[in-house]
Amino acid sequence: MSMLILGLLIFLGAHATSIVAPAWRDAQVAARGEKAWKALYGAVSLVGFVLIVYGYGLARGAPVVLYQPPAALRHVAWLLMLPVFPLLLASHLPGHLSRVTKHPMLVATKFWALAHLLANGTLASTLLFAAFLAWAVADRISLKRRVPGPTLGRAGRFNDAIAVVGGLLLYAAFIGGVHLWLIGVSPR
C-alpha cells in the first residue's frame, strides 16, 4: 500500500503544482525554460504513475475490503463511464464539447474516478479513485483563479463528432476486452 500512496503523492503532487504553488511553478518555467520544465514534470509524473500501477497491483494481491458494492452500482459505473472517452478526446480536439466543459479532461477524470469508486470497495481502490477525484475537483476550482493557458487552436468542423464517435468506440473496446487485457479485471 505504501508504493501506491507514494505514487499518488508524486503523481498528483506534480499535477497539483499549479493549484498549490502557481508562483513557484511559473518561476521554475522561467528559470529552466518551458521545454525543460515539461521534461522534468513528465519524468516526475512518469515515476509517480509507475509507482501507482505497481503499488495498486501489489495491493490487489492482498485486498482489504472496505465494503461490497451492490451489483446495481456496476451499471451506474458503466453509465458514468460513457462520457469519459469522448471527453478525453475532446480535450485534444477543440470544439463545442471542450468549450462547454471548459476542461474536458478534468470532467472525464471526475466521471472516471466516481464510477470506479462506486464499483470497487477495496482500500486500494478507494485511495486511488478518491485521490484522483479530489485532485480533479481541486484543480477545477483552482482554474477559476488562474490565468487561462494557451488554447488548442481553432475548432475543427468535425472535432466534436470525432470525439463522440471515437470516444464511444474506445468505450466499447474497453468494455469488450481492453480493460481486462490492460487492467486484469473485466468491467462486465
Image (cartoon, rainbow, N blue to C red):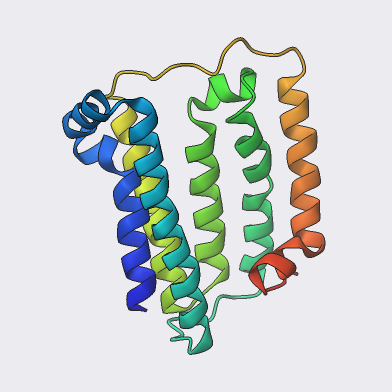
Front residue of 22/120: it is 22
Which residue is located at x 35 percent, y 33 percent? 36
Question: Quick check: 139 above or below 10?
Answer: above
Quadrant, the N terminus: bottom left
Q: Quadrant of residue 164?
A: top right
Q: Position of residue 118 (x, y in %)?
A: 53, 65
In this view, the residue farthest toward the top is: 154
Front residue of 146/27: it is 27
- Residue 150 horizontal side relative to residue 160, left or right: left
- Residue 84 horizontal side relative to residue 176, left or right: left
Question: Quick check: 138 above or below 80?
Answer: above
Quadrant, the C terminus: bottom right
Whether residue 4 appears in this view of the structure is: yes
Q: Quadrant of residue 182?
A: bottom right
Question: Quick check: 59 above or below 181?
Answer: below
Front residue of 47/63: it is 47
Whether residue 187 appears in this view of the structure is: no
Which residue is located at x 55 percent, y 75 percent? 69
Which residue is located at x 67 percent, y 74 percent? 184
Question: Quick check: 66 above or below 10?
Answer: below
Q: Position of residue 29 (x, y in %)?
A: 27, 28
In this view, the residue farthest toward the bottom is: 62
Q: Position of residue 172 (x, y in %)?
A: 80, 52
How many marks the image carries: the answer is: 0
Which residue is located at x 70 percent, y 14 percent? 156
Q: Position of residue 128 (x, y in %)?
A: 43, 65
